[in-house]
Every structure is written in C-alpha cells, then in structure tokens.
Image: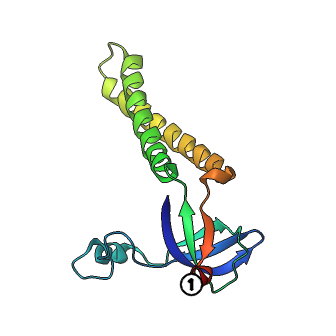
Amino acid sequence: MLETRAIIIRLDGDEAIVEAKQGGGCGQCDSTKGCGKASQLFSLQPRRFRVRNEINARVGEEVQVFVADGVLLRSAAIIYMFPLALLLLGGSLGTQFAGESGSSDGYAVIGAMLGLAAGFVLARLFTLRQRALSSAQPVIARSEEMCHFH
C-alpha cells in the first residue's frame, strides 16, 4: 500500500479534504540537492486530495492516507497508454484510409489527432469510473493521535 501523512483541512460528509505533507520518497524533498526542490518550482499550491474518512477524523488532525496496491500504477498506465495507443492506431488507420493518394501524411495526422482525442475521452471515462469504485479511492486508515496511544 502507498501511504502518506496529511492534515485534514475540511470535512464534506463522509469524505475529507486533506493536504498532503511534503516529504516521503527518498527523504531529499526539503534538500537543495534532491528532486523535491525541482518539483516545488512547478507546484504553486499544496497537494490537496479528497479521501474517504472512515475513522471520523476531525479538521486539523494529522492522519495516514492509504491507496491500495496497484491503483496508482494502473491509473497512470491507463491515462498515458489509452491516448498513446489510440494516437498510433489513428495514424495507422489514417494512412490506410488514404490508400494510394499522395496525401497520406495528411490523413495520418488527422487520424492520429482523432485517435488522441478518443484516447483522452476514454482515459477521462476510466478516471470517472475509478472514482466511483470504493476500492480505488484513497482512505484515511488511522489518525496520528491514535498511533501515539498504541
């Protein structure tokens, strides 16, 4: 399971909006030598996520947020692979559609762009479907306060 520490900043029904704490990874996130410094250049806001709050944690609590094994990798693969695969397929079909005409490159470009657009649409539909599955959503598994008492 992937996990990160976060602070609850808002509650919304049985879900919480959490702000992930910086750190994790290799421990170099705050170092001037680590990749975390480079990523801070592109991150204008803190990372905020909507998670299931099954332990009824309160605003201001520091909690552990978990994502089931494979969910992140599967989602990343779908988000990148659908558009890429359909771009290549669309370009190939565009070339086939052109036949022997001299403008097969134009057909390939149009087919590739249509394939890419279809790939983005399919990736978006997959993402929306994943949000509906409870097994694919991040969840607060324990509060930091609870950990100190055990």
Image-based side of 85 in relation to 146, left or right = left
Residue visible at 48% across and 35% down in the picture: 114
Q: Residues within 10 Å of mark 1 (few under 14, many from 20)?
A: few
Measured as percent of width and height from the top left, residue 98 is found at 38, 19
* Residue, disc 1: 148
| Of the pair 94 and 141, the residue shown nearer to us | 141
Residue visible at 48% across and 46% down in the picture: 74
Q: Amino acid at mark 1?
A: His
Measured as percent of width and height from the top left, residue 77 is found at 44, 45
Measured as percent of width and height from the top left, residue 66 is found at 55, 64
SS for callout 1:
helix
Q: Quadrant of the C terminus?
A: bottom right
- Is residue 81 positioned above or below 139 on the image? above
| Of the pair 128 and 116, the residue shown nearer to us | 128
Residue visible at 49% across and 49% down in the picture: 70
Farthest residue to the left: give it: 33
